[in-house]
Amino acid sequence: MLQWLTRLGTEHPVRAIALGTAVALVYSFALTFLGALAFTGWNRDLGLGETLVLGATIPLLVAPPMLAGVLRLLRRLDRLSDALRIAAETDPLTSVHNRRGFFERAGDDEFAGHAVYMVDLDDFKRLNDTFGHDLGDRVLQEVAEWLTVAIGEGALVGRLGGDEFACVTRHLDTSIGDRRHHFDMQGVTYSISIGATIVGSTETVSEALMRADSALYRVKTAPAPEHSR
């Protein structure tokens, strides 16, 4: 039982605590009842009804505060679990999903027909080397914010690493995909290239992103179009 609870606790800690509490209460009642029976063996004046009352008294007194404490603990664990999950799946710099969070959400079969975008900052290393990492960080934040707004509500936006982002949304927007977008931050101009495609009926998001990455390469190697924002 202990090994099973331990294994359950590593996967579902809230369930393990609730089940462990229930088991503890049952054992508490059983042991107290057996103790009361043993006591009646020494005190023949107590009848069966009085024995049952005595056997139930201690668990009934102990259970309410114990359950209240467990419920408070469970609520705190739920909040902590949610906070840890969000932190583990969120890029701390840009506040969009990190690579893990993005692919965990994009790893099912519900995205057939959706649009996927691969996004890359052009010459980001030169930008960092010339103007410093502080400005580079602000550029990444601005790009993440722009993608979140431009792709639309309900879209999945993630920073896959470095200066690379990916997005999944229900409909393809040709004003965003397969083109270069130019920005200006405090007099510093930079651009991002975006490749786009549609997830096939038998395709995963990861497979579609490979085709979007090919489209991104074509955008990056093509002559720069007229500036857009």
Image (cartoon, helix red, strand yellow):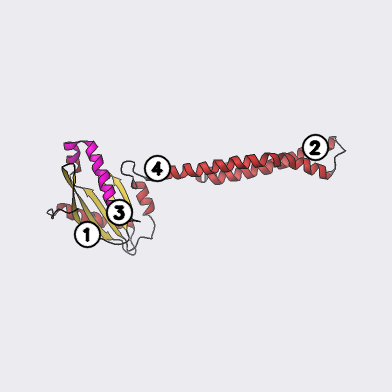
Mark 1 residue crowding within 10 angstroms, few (<14) / some (14–19) / many (20+): few
Q: CA distance from mark 2 to mark 1?
A: 83 Å
Q: Are marks 4 and 2 in contact (CB under 8 Å)?
A: no
Residue that mark 3 sits on: 167
Residue that mark 4 sits on: 87
Q: Residue at x 78, y 44 (%)?
A: 52
Q: CA distance from mark 3 to mark 4?
A: 19 Å
Give the image quarter of residue 134. top left
Q: Residue at x 38, y 51 (%)?
A: 104
Q: Can you give x and y, in whole percent of width and height, for residue 222 in the image?
A: 13, 54
Q: Is residue 36 left or right of residue 115?
A: right
Amino acid found under the numbered disc labelled 4: Ala
Q: Can you give x and y, in whole percent of width and height, for residue 116 in the image?
A: 29, 57
Q: Residue at x 22, y 59 (%)?
A: 175
Q: CA distance from mark 4 to mark 1?
A: 32 Å
Amino acid found under the numbered disc labelled 2: Ala
Query: For the N terminus, which image quadrant?
Result: top right
Badge 3 or badge 2: first in the primary sequence: 2
Q: Main secondary structure of the magenta part?
A: helix
